[in-house]
Every structure is written in C-alpha cells, then in structure tokens.
Image (tube, rainbow, N blue to C red):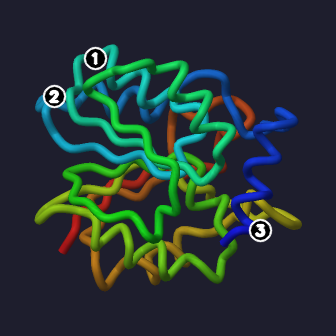
Amino acid sequence: MENYQTFWNNQYQVNTLGWDLGTISPPIKSYIDTLQDKNIRILIPGCGNSYEAAYLLEQGFTNVTIIDIAPTLVKNLKNKFKNNPNLNIILGDFFEHQGEYDLIIEQTFFCALPPAMRQDYASKMHQLLSKHGKLAGLLFNRTFDSGPPFGGSQEEYENLFKNTFHFLKMEVCQNSVAPRAGFELWIEFQKK
C-alpha cells in the first residue's frame, strides 16, 4: 500500500488533479439535499478535496468522517476545516479503517482503485455500514484505456454488489457535470 500512498500523495504535491471538479458534484449535492436526519454518521472515503464534506457541514450535518491516504492532502484538509467538531479527518488506509456508518458517499474513490481491489471494496463497504446503511454516489459507466481512473459497467457492478446489497437505484445519472454526462451511474445500495 505504501507505493499507492506515494502515488496519490505526489498527485496532491504537484497539484495534478484532473479529476477534481473544484466543487461538489451536482448529483451528490442533489442527494444530500434530500437527507432529513442531520445526525446520521457519514463517511467519505478517498475524500480528495472534500467539497462534499464542506457542503454537508454547511447544511448542518453533525457527524461526518473523511479519510484519505495522502498525507499532503490530509494536512491541507486539517487547515481548511480547522477544529470543526462535526468533522473527523483521518489519514489512513480505507481498507484498515474501523467504524460504523449510516451512509457512505462514493465520489471518485472506487474508480481510483485498481480493479483487483474491487471485491475488497464491496466487502469493506458492507462491513462499515450499519444495519440498513446505504452506499450512495457515482460510478463510471465507461472504460478507460488505462488508469486511474479505472472504468466499469453496470453489469460488473451488479455482479460485484448483488450478494451483499439491495439495489435501490442504479441508473444513468441525469445531472452529471458536462465532461461526465452519460458516463456516470447514480447508485444507492442498501446493506443486506
């Protein structure tokens, strides 16, 4: 995992952040706007610059955890969100993380992982979610020549998650940012 950590840390050190939208993704913003309980336990793995966490905090959510493996990024986030009691910022490996969450938000974390890690991702998501907890967010519905990002398809995701999750939604996203229009699936999976 150390090489992986070095790779991602270097991306933040030299600011090569082509995937970074500079703001919260519209589909995730729309989803957050539907959430009523501001006290649910929320995790954002591979959190990047954490526009989603910033929006959650602006909307009054009180129990948000973000985790990333890149020390440079985490240091920046700790400065950005100085002493916010509603946000827990963790430098660490998602696959070693322990906790229990009602909602995990997926935003460009899955696609950053090599495909060989996808089964581990599905298992870890299931482990971290509370009873009836949800995994919600965006997955690419396209392939790439190389990665990261690594693409995928609806059929692959169905096979990966069908044994441990109920599919509440998995559909082509209607409000993606222009460069990703038609290439994202909105997912809402509930832990079985």
Residue 189: image quadrant is bottom left
Relative to 32, residue 143 above or below? below
Measuring 21% from the left and 59% from the top, which residue is drawn there?
100
Q: Are discs 1 and 2 less than 8 Å apart at CB?
A: yes
The residue to which callout 3 is attached is: 3
111 or 145, which lies in front? 111
Q: Report the residue marked by disc 2.
A: 38
Question: Is 148 in front, or is 85?
Answer: 85
Query: Residue 144's x, y, as percent?
Result: 81, 62
Is 49 left, or right, of 164 in this rendering?
right
Question: In the image, 49: left or right of 94?
Answer: right
Q: Residues within 10 Å of mark 2 (few under 14, many from 20)?
A: some
- Left/right of residue 30 with respect to residue 20 in the rendered view: left
Q: Which x, y percent locates residue 37?
A: 11, 32
Q: Are marks 1 and 3 in contact (CB under 8 Å)?
A: no
The residue shown at (19%, 58%) is 133
Relative to 172, say whether 39 is above or below: above
Residue 86 vs residue 150, the one in the foreground: 86
Which residue is identified by label 1? Answer: 59
Q: Amino acid at mark 2?
A: Lys
